[in-house]
Structures are given as structure tokens and as C-alpha cells.
Amino acid sequence: MHVAPLRAAALGSSPFISYRSVVSSTVSKFVFVAALLAPAPALAAHTFDLDAKMPPHLAAVFAVNWFGIPSSDPQGGGADPGYGNWLQKFPQCGLDDDPSTCADFRDAGRQRSIASTRRPLAGIYSSSARTDESVNRVDLMLSCVRRPCDLGGRLDAFLLQLDSVAFTSGHPQNQQVKTWDLAYRAVLGFLAEGDKAHMDGSVWIGNDATVYWHFGAAVGLNDQTARKVALEADIVDMATLAAAHPSAVSIAGKPFLAFYVDSALMTPTEWQQVLDGARQTSGIDFYAMATTLNGTFFSAFDALSPWVNLGLWANAKGANLHDKGIDYATQMHAQLLSALKTNPGRVMFGGVAPGFDDYTQNWGACQPRQIPRDPAVLAGQLGYLTSLKTTQAYDVRGVIWDTWDDWTEGTELEPDVVDGPAKLIQLKQLLGTLYGEQADTTGDQALAQRWLGYGQARSCCFENGQCEAGAPPKVDLSCPPPGGDASADAGSEPDAPNDLDAGSGNETTSGGCGCEAAGAGGGSLAWPGAVAVAILVVTRIRRRAT
């Protein structure tokens, strides 16, 4: 079973129901401005030389960014057309969430009722970066990326998924699909914040290349040719956008673009034609990575990475979850490793995920789907990648985490109200082992406290009367200049590259009745102790994985 069809089938039309609701029944004509521009001078043929150009590490977390806060939210102030994927109703399966309401959630007190089996530690939020509240959340996420003064979560970039460019505010003359615009605006917001903080290469521009096949008819894309033309135009825009921003991921001066693909929708030959067409039209040569198990796609892409696969997990063997995680990862990467032998210059990125815990029960089919979100499963996957590196079977430099924020299907890394930042700290420590880096105990604690101290701008305080959204802390992403005074940051530690921001010196919290600690208003969370225990457990698991 291939990965891409799994995700496409899982999505169906449900996550994008709001797309269809905003599309006129009379399909309007659209114009792809980028595709109509006079072609730039012909480029030389693309060279597959990424393997020789790769940095020692490029760990990225895939973010879907399909969440919004509407103006109708009980705490007001939202700038989006709706809640996006916070809201998914499947009453036939007993699933009837409403993000504008609250309910008791485990021991975390009152929490917003969303389409997930967990709840965000920092509360629900908008991905669109259209308000200060949303921009602050972008900065909080970017604080997980390496900076000269802070290892963060040992991530090198956030890989941001676009659903479309053509049918968003990027091309206002075209028919607009409001939910797709959330992700487009998120990319712009991340690039703006990354540029401002001089975080070069921290934002990886990606694309869900299945969207036009599943939902294209709603915007007039009714056949293979029309969908490929639209996709190629989007890729032109992606390359142009990446080339204009220092914070966009590039390697050896070339933008690096990423694509979630379904191998059943386009052949490798079709992909090569579309990618080369976008290069010629934009006048920009770029590297490209795809998520697939199918090694034949190396003929079109510079890099491939596997995606979460329920079928392979079901077939995985092992005496315990850790060993089953190793076997699962072995199956996931086997075909790609084999295909590298006949595709010189290409790169395999390791693919890992914390598990799979599907709130939607297969998008309303009432079929539970799960890969245990146990720390041992993650340790097994990273242990496999580490063994490839230490045995010199393959030099694993790239890692893709699936995902940061798919709360609906339960692959999210983002801290939640039950486990806190434990998954984030575990991944950081396991990446340190993979890359042969020293421990960063001070940085681990700083990262945990940054999330634990953030509070929830969108809480349940409105249940006790009118309550506006709180003002979340502003995370300072700046680093002192080389040789400058770092006294405002947390004390340094020999194993860290520079002083580490513990979340107190560079962050300030503005008051607001809605900006409260997670769990406030009903139930308490003993976070500091819980995180300390989690860090010890993660360290023990990491040692076993090596």
C-alpha cells in the first residue's frame, strides 16, 4: 500500500468541505498569470547533484496550516472565514465538535471542543498570520528551529504546505477558495518573520500536489491537463517566492521545494515535465523533494521521503513497540534505499511520525485507525535511521517529521495539554543522537518552559461572561551579534553553542483575561515536574535506540 493514496482517502472531501461551500456553483474562469508570462531565457538542464550539496543536517517538520479563528469566536478578534480543520463533524460516528464551545478534557480542565483526540497546550489558534495573536504563534513555532544562540528543537526548518496559490489572495483576479488562503497566508507570515529574525533557511515551501485532483472540479479543473497546468503555475509562484526570501530553504543557491504526492495521480514522467516547465517559466532552477515510497520517482525528484503508512505498521513485527517501530521504519525506507543505487545524486530523507490517532475514524466511515503514540515507537524509528548512519549503510542527513499540526489525524508534534512538550523534547534529543551532537539539557528545559509558559489566548473564560482573547507572549527570535552581550539570555552551558533563551529574559507576557495557563478554570497541570520526568524517560529511550 502506498502512502499517498492512504492520506488522500483519509482526507476525502471532509477537511475541505468549507472549500466547496465557498465556491460558486457557476465556475468562474481563472487566469494563471505566472504561466502566461513570457518565458525567461532557457535554463540549462537541471542537474541531479543534491547529494553532493546537502548540508550535514536538514531536519524539518511538515505543517499543514489549515486552522482559523473567525470573527464569530466567543472571544472575538478572529480574521479568518472559519475555524478550518478545528471543526469536523461526523455525527454518524458520534463526533460532533464545536470549537466555539468547551468541555472537560481529561485532567486539563475546560478546553475548546475541537476535531482531535487531544488539545493544543497553547490553545486553538489561526494559522494565517493575519493578526498579532497569530503572528506571535508563528514566532513560538519558529523558536523550535535552530538559531546561532539556541538549538531550539534541533529542527532546521518548518516545511509549510500550500494547497494552492492560484486560487488564493496571491491571485485575487482568480476565483478565491478561502480555506486554501489560510495556508497561503501562513507561508507569507512565516517568511516575513523568518526574514525579520535573520533565520535564513528556516522556512521550507511545500505543496499538497493532490488537492487539484481531489477538489479541482470545484474551481474548473476537470481533467489531467488542466490540473497539471494549475500545479505548474503554482510551482512557478513557489520558486519565485522562495528566491525572494532569505528565510526560504535553499541549497547551494537554489530554492528547495517540497511536495506531498500521490503516485497514482501523476507519473514520474509527468512530474519531470511539470517541474522542468516551472523551471523554464520562472527562470529559476530549484531542487525538489516528494513524499512517496515509490523509488521510481527519483527520475523526477532530487529527494524522496516516506510518509506515514498504516498498512506497513499493521505488517510490522517486533517483540515490543520499540522493535516494531524499527521494523516499520525499515519497511518504509527499503525501496528508496534500493532505488538510490541506480539514481546517483539523489537523497533519501528519513520519514518519522509520533504515531497516528485519527479523530475522524476514517473521515466518517466509523473505522478507528491508529499507530500508537508511544515514545517507544518514535525511538524505534529514529533508532533505525541512526543505525543506518552509524553502520555507514546510508548517511542520513535529512529528516521529515509528519506532522507538526495535523491534530485531526493525530500525527502532530505540537505540544498538547496531556503530554506537554514531551514529544518535542524527545524528538530534539533523538535528532541530537542521529547527528552526533552533544546533549543540551539547558536548552531542553528552556524549550519546554517556552511552551509551558505561553498560556492560551483562546480559552474557555467566556463561559463565565464576556472575555476577549488574551495577548500571548511575544517570543524574541533575535540573537545577540557575535561577541555581543548575551547577558539577557539564560546562562550558557558548555554543551550548547551559545547562551540559551529560557523564556524569561526575552519574552514578555501582556495581560488579558483569556491568556491563561493551560487547564485554568477547572483542573490543574503539574507541568514542570511532568516535563522533568518526560525528559528523563526520553533520555533513557534514546540510549536504548542507539
Image (cartoon, rainbow, N blue to C red):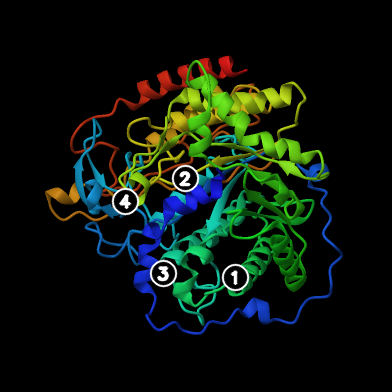
What's the distance in space between the residues labelled 4 and 1, CA to CA?
Answer: 28 Å
What's the distance in space between the residues labelled 3 and 2, CA to CA?
Answer: 25 Å
Which residue corresponds to mark 4?
A: 364
- The residue tagged with tag 3: helix, strand or loop? helix
User: Where's residue 295, x and y in %?
Assistant: 70, 45
CB contact under 8 Å: marks 4 and 3: no
Please tell me which of labels 2 and 1 falls first in the chain: 2
Which residue corresponds to mark 3?
A: 178
- The residue tagged with tag 4: helix, strand or loop? helix
- Residue lying at the far left in this picture: please name it: 464
Residue 315 seen by the camera: yes
User: Where's residue 196, x and y in %?
Assistant: 59, 56
Please tell me which of labels 4 and 1 falls first in the chain: 1
Report crowding for label 1: few under 14, some 14 to 19, many 20 or more residues within 10 A (C-alpha): few
Q: Which amino acid type is shown beneath numbered disc 1?
A: Gln
Report crowding for label 3: few under 14, some 14 to 19, many 20 or more residues within 10 A (C-alpha): many
Please tell me which of labels 3 and 1 falls first in the chain: 3
Q: Quadrant of the C terminus?
A: top right
Marking on residue 58: none
Marking on residue 224: 1
